Amino acid sequence: MLVHLLRSHPNIVCHGEVFALNALGHIHGKYAQMRRQDPKAETELLALAQKDPKSFLTEVVFDPQDHKAVGFKYKTDEAFNRKLSHIRDLIAADPDVKIIYLVRRNILDQYISHHVVLKKTGITLLKEQEDRPEIKPFAINIRKCIKYANDVMSRHHDITEHYNNHKNITVFYEDLVAKNETTFDNLQDF
């Protein structure tokens, strides 16, 4: 949702999750067009991402493509994945990179949402209210829920420590959903 919000701004190019273990993630703009038009582009971009992630980050992901700002989605579960932690460290090495932390105030809601996506629907983005599937009541394992909440809070603490030299802003999911004007203004100013 935050990626789509940022992408809707005419001065921002915002990629999705560009770093994945064995595939090329979602790159927006001219690189997406290249991938659609030339099958070799997919292979070349993936090879660059795997062999030289620093060049991929600086030359492809951070290419402004005639925009004033560029961004991409990088979740904490990726940042602390041993196989992707080098990306976390590349970002940490460049204090000019600004960080937007998207968090939820209500971690129980986050857990339920995560459970619904993974176990019930597979849907991560709804564009229209009528596309919302009906979810039947279900039970949750309270121990797994507590473990999940502790993990979320621990990763947020650890990532903010890791990027403590970066300018950052925390955006609450609930404020985005409520279309809180102050949140949007602060995000745009940032």
Image: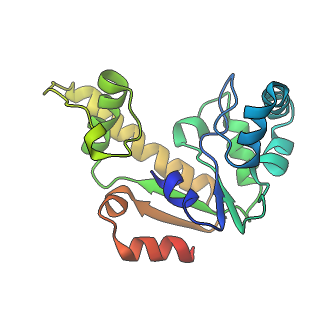
Write the residue at 50% across / 70% down: 187
Front-lying residue, 22 or 81: 22
Specify the color scheme.
rainbow
In-image side of 182 versus 13 (left or right): left
Q: Point out the image quarter for the C terminus.
A: bottom right
Q: Which residue is farthest left?
A: 137
In the picture, residue 115 is in which quadrant?
top left
Write the residue at 79% across / 34% down: 49
Relative to residue 179, is residue 75 depicted above or below? above
Q: Position of residue 143 (x, y in %)?
A: 24, 27
Q: Position of residue 45 (x, y in %)?
A: 81, 33
Q: How many marks?
A: 0
Q: Position of residue 59 (x, y in %)?
A: 85, 49
Relative to residue 101, is residue 169 depicted above or below? below
In-image side of 161 versus 142 (left or right): right
Write the residue at 73% across / 63% down: 95
Q: Which residue is farthest front?
A: 37
In the picture, residue 108 is in which quadrant?
top left
